[in-house]
Amino acid sequence: MPYHSAPLDLAFHALSDPTRRAVVSRLSEGEVPVSLLAEPFDMALPSFVQHLKVLEDCGLIASEKRGRSRWCRLVQARFDEAADWMEAERRRWTDRLDRLELYLDKTKEDGEGNGNPV
Amino acid sequence: MPYHSAPLDLAFHALSDPTRRAVVSRLSEGEVPVSLLAEPFDMALPSFVQHLKVLEDCGLIASEKRGRSRWCRLVQARFDEAADWMEAERRRWTDRLDRLELYLDKTKEDGEGNGNPV
């Protein structure tokens, strides 16, 4: 099976939490210092930092110390890996439905050609 | 925060396992009886069925007994929910980069207009 991809496992695990998804959403608009990133969440800072650690460990975000602040940013490549997987599956699914539709149309045409009601 | 979406939590959790992602991949090509679905996996059937249960509990797949077989199929709506979330985030990110690029182009043009080297 070509699916033993630990980075994808960790990325989807990271995205299974609403706080971590909200962080990803916020960072998709640009980099933010941790203190500002934490503000909207009703959560103790150590718990919030733990969520950031999960996101950073799986490579979805990166952080950097600048002066007295730590800034976070989204890492597009890892996010794309997960998003690409989902889109590839969706495409397979819609391709299959398209093929099914073509087949049904053809069956209907053939039936009409033979003078059989459908 | 508008992110407290238990179904999304469960869907991403379900996708964090390579066996469950492989099942989703297989089912994106059409419905399959459990026995056939289990075949490529080097895993005891009860463990495999446990993975199917995680996928079914979060609504990513559905199953139905027909005669002596249980057939599984992908539930597109739940899959789309997760895939749509990822695509929306990706769009926000690329929109931001597009805006940034426009801004930099404009800054460069203005600079050239003033005869300043960039």
Image: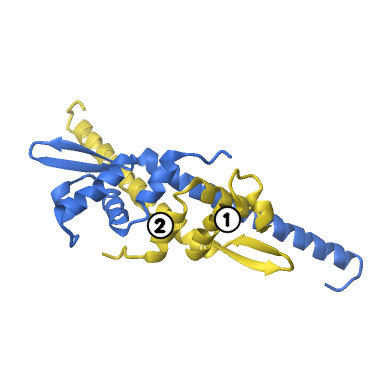
Chain colours: A blue, B yellow
Earlier sequence position, callout 1 versus callout 2: 1
Q: Pointer 2: what residue?
A: B85
In the image, taking residue B105 as reference, residue A66 lies left or right, namely: left
Residue A62 rendering spot, x and y as whole percentages: 26, 39
Residues tagged by mark 1 and mark 2 found on one chain of the structure = yes
Q: Which mark is residue B1?
A: none
Residue toward you, B39 or B1: B39
Q: Quadrant of residue B100?
A: top left
**Helix, strand or loop at disc 2?**
helix
Residue toward you, A48 or A25: A48
Could you tell me which chain the residue with mark 1 belongs to? B
Residue A43 rendering spot, x and y as whole percentages: 18, 59
Q: Which mark is residue B46?
A: 1
Residue B93 rendering spot, x and y as whole percentages: 33, 47
- Name the residue: 86% across, 74% down: A117
In the image, taking residue B76 as reference, residue A101 lies left or right, namely: right
Q: Taking the image as drawn, is residue B3 in sight?
A: yes
- Name the residue: 19% across, 25% down: B117
Spot the residue most to the left.
A68
What type is the residue that disc 1 sits on? Pro
Quarter of the image with the C terminus of chain B is: top left
